[in-house]
Amino acid sequence: MQAPEVNRPVRLLEDLPELGLRSGEVGVVCSTWFAPQPAYEVEFQPRGHATRALVMRNQIQPADDDDEN
């Protein structure tokens, strides 16, 4: 599985109830953070409004991986 890239779609692997996001939602990586450990700023658009979340690598997978299964 490749690492998520900026401007590429990713799928959320767990619920983030504090942000109203559910597992399986697809968003787009906006930026990558490298310190203190890799994290990704992802914009989701559930129900038509943008929500940005800072997530760890284990919380997302590239949505393109869905095509390989």
Image (cartoon, rainbow, N blue to C red):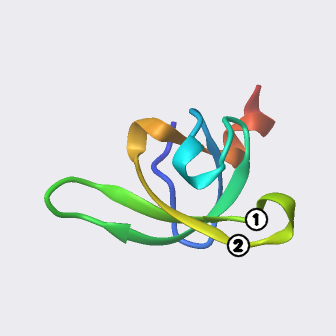
Q: Mark 1 — residue?
A: 45
Q: Amino acid at mark 2?
A: Ala
Q: Residue furthest top?
A: 69
Labels 1 & 2 near each other (Cβ < 8 A): yes
Q: Amino acid at mark 1?
A: Gln
Q: Determine which quarter of the picture holds residue 58.
A: top left
Q: Position of residue 18 (x, y in %)?
A: 53, 48
Q: Mark 2 — residue?
A: 50
Q: Is residue 14 left or right of residue 11?
A: left
Locate the C terminus by quadrant.
top right
User: In percent of the image, x 77 and y 72: which residue is there?
Assistant: 49
Q: Position of residue 56 (x, y in %)?
A: 38, 47
User: In percent of the image, x 28 and y 55: which residue is there?
Assistant: 38
Determine whether the residue tagged by mark 1 lies in a helix, strand or loop.
Answer: loop
Q: Which mark is residue 37?
A: none
User: In percent of the image, x 48 and y 39: which residue is there?
Assistant: 59
Q: Is residue 47 left or right of residue 43?
A: right
